[in-house]
Amino acid sequence: MINIVFAARPEKFHLYEAHLKRCLSHKGIAANLTTACAPEDVDYLIYAPDSTIQDLTPYTRCKAVLSLWAGVETFVGNETLTQPLCRMVDSGLRQGMTEWVTGHTLRYHLGMDQHIVNPGQIWDEAHPPLAQDRPVTILGLGALGEACGTALSLLGFPVTGWSRTAKDVAGITCYHGPEGLGHALATAQILILLLPDTPQTENVLNSETLAQMPKGSVIINPGRGPLIDDKALISALKQGHISAACLDVFRVEPLPQDHPYWTLPNVTVTPHIASGTRAATAAEVVVSNIARGEQGLPFLHLVDRAARY
Ligand code: NAP
């Protein structure tokens, strides 16, 4: 019998408990699944970076910390964390992000806003271009970026992607590394940010890189707030170099009430809802990793501590 502690916020336990028990039973794993246990007896921690447990030192027997979040930037540098850390790669999270990104990309591509709110009753018969004439770029070609890029490519958009290491993804023109960024930005009429927040990605969108984008481009950021130099983006929005932005994530959340993003007419603020971990599918991922740990197999979705994602 192994001890598994659900160490995300306790009020979330009821969402996960039945799914975790179903998956454990399916895998034939005898486990005590609980929200509290003596630290030295814990075999696995199902974790969220906003957990009340921040000192991992007493968890001497713990074989892995299994995050329910995809983004681990607030936890990956925790010096008490000596156990393997796995991040969340969940089909529900991926599907939700694909829907959100595709929805907002189509919204800007089709110019939907001008008809949804049209107090001047403007009758403009101009047709939007077809997807094939709207190049889209995704910064970050990981679990989420690749899924979104593939969906947009299947809709007909010419999709360019950028990652840290070289990639080969069907339907996506791939660039990587610092030298690839300029190529990825040069055609980005719609730019989607799906990078993790690391020291290397902070302010990846700044006055210099914004200037490399075509005039009138749109930015969609469901990645993380620190990816954007906010002052530079606000300036580019005011000057019209960037025509609109849809921002789901911010340096400070909730976004402070006096933040300029709330009032800029060409900015949409969404409250970090682009996609969330879904308990039913996430439980399968977590339990699969526990099963691997029990069989002595390497864990899936391990965080690279040096790269910090
Ligand atoms: P992932 O699988 O780790 O993918 C990250 C991608 O970013 C990879 O392609 C990686 O390159 C690339 N990357 C990292 N550092 C880079 C650098 N310095 N230069 C260029 N590319 C770099 O992550 P994911 O699961 O797709 O999630 C991405 C992010 O989405 C998360 O970290 C989180 O912040 C955010 N997120 C937001 C929400 C929301 O609701 N708004 C929900 C879930 C996740 P390689 O492929 O070469 O490693």
Image (spheres, rainbow, N blue to C red):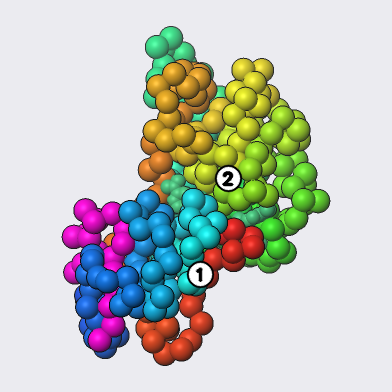
Q: Which contiguous range is marked in magenta?
A: 1-19
What residue sits right under mark 2 in the picture? Answer: 193
Q: Position of residue 167 (x, y in %)?
A: 68, 65
Question: In the image, is the residue at mark 1 within 8 Å of ligand 1 by its beta carbon?
Answer: no
Image: 240 above or below 204:
above
Tag 2 or tag 1, which sits nearer the N-term?
A: 1
Looking at the rendering, the quadrant in which ligand 1 lies is: bottom right
> Which mark is drawn over residue 29?
none
**Camera-side residue of 163 and 88:** 88
What residue sits right under mark 1 in the picture? Answer: 82
Figure quadrant of residue 304: bottom right
Q: Quadrant of the C terminus?
A: bottom right
- Residue 10 highlighted magenta (yes or no): yes
- Residue 36 highlighted magenta (yes or no): no
Q: Residue at x 33, y 75 (%)?
A: 40
Q: Residue at x 52, y 46 (%)?
A: 223
Q: Nearer the viewer, mark 1 or mark 2?
A: 1
- Relative to 53, 104 lies left or right: right
Figure quadrant of residue 237: top right
- Name which residue type carries label 2: Leu
Report helix, strand or loop for mark 1: loop
Q: Position of residue 168 (x, y in %)?
A: 68, 66
Q: Position of residue 91 (x, y in %)?
A: 40, 64
- Name which residue type carries label 1: Thr
**Camera-side residue of 32 and 280:** 32
Q: Residue at x 31, y 62 (%)?
A: 7
Image: 137 above or below 63:
above
- In this orientation, does residue 270 appear? no
